[in-house]
Image (spheres, rainbow, N blue to C red):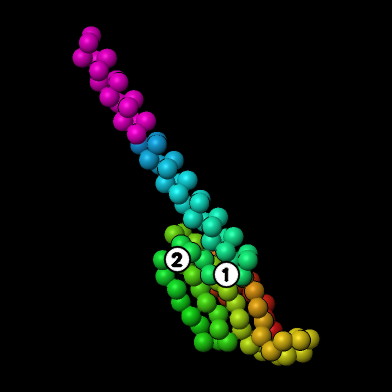
């Protein structure tokens, strides 16, 4: 009887430790994501970047975070009609596996 009680206690404490670790990782990821979001919103570079990539289309930069990517568009439009600037600018948030230019209109 005593043996079973200690086994149940060990299982509960193991589950509790795993839950604490998972919740801590989610919290840390959320803090990193929100910090990067705030930086990009204020036109600064994100802080928690794993990898950075450039496109030679006028200056588009892709910042890869953990599970997401920020894309800072700075492209030369295909036609300059209706644009006061020679570049199309914009910011987008996408998952890693998404196409960088899907949904960004710069005609």
* Residue 99 in view: no
Label 1 sits on a secondary structure element that is loop
Task: Report the residue at 34% width, 34% height from top.
Answer: 17
Q: What stretch is highlighted in magenta?
A: 1-17
Task: Report the residue at 58% width, 87% height from top.
Answer: 58
Q: Which residue matches tag 1?
A: 44
Task: Report the residue at 48% width, 80% height from top.
Answer: 54
16 in the magenta segment: yes
Q: Which of marks 1 and 2 is nearer the N terminus?
A: 1
Badge 1, how many Cα within 10 Å: few under 14, some, many 20+?
few
Quadrant, the N terminus: top left
Using the image, tell me which numbered label, if any, was put on residue 8. Answer: none
* Residue 3 in view: yes
Badge 2, how many Cα within 10 Å: few under 14, some, many 20+?
some
Count of residue discs = 2
Label 2 sits on a secondary structure element that is loop
Res 24 quadrant in image: top left
Nearer mark to the viewer, of 1 and 2: 1
Q: Which residue matches tag 2?
A: 49
Give me the C-alpha separation between circle 1 and circle 2: 13 Å
Residue 49 location (% of width, % of height): 45, 66
Quadrant, the C terminus: bottom right
């Amino acid at each position: 009887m005593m043996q079973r009680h200690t086994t149940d206690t060990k299982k509960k404490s193991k589950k509790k430790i795993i839950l604490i670790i998972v919740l801590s990782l989610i919290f840390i990821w959320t803090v990193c994501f929100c910090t990067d979001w705030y930086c990009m919103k204020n036109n600064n570079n994100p802080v928690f970047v794993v990898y950075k990539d450039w496109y030679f289309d006028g200056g588009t930069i892709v910042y890869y975070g953990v599970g997401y990517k920020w894309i800072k568009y700075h492209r030369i439009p295909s036609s300059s009609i209706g644009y006061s600037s020679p570049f199309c600018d914009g910011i987008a948030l996408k998952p890693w596996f998404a196409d960088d230019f899907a949904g960004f209109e710069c005609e």
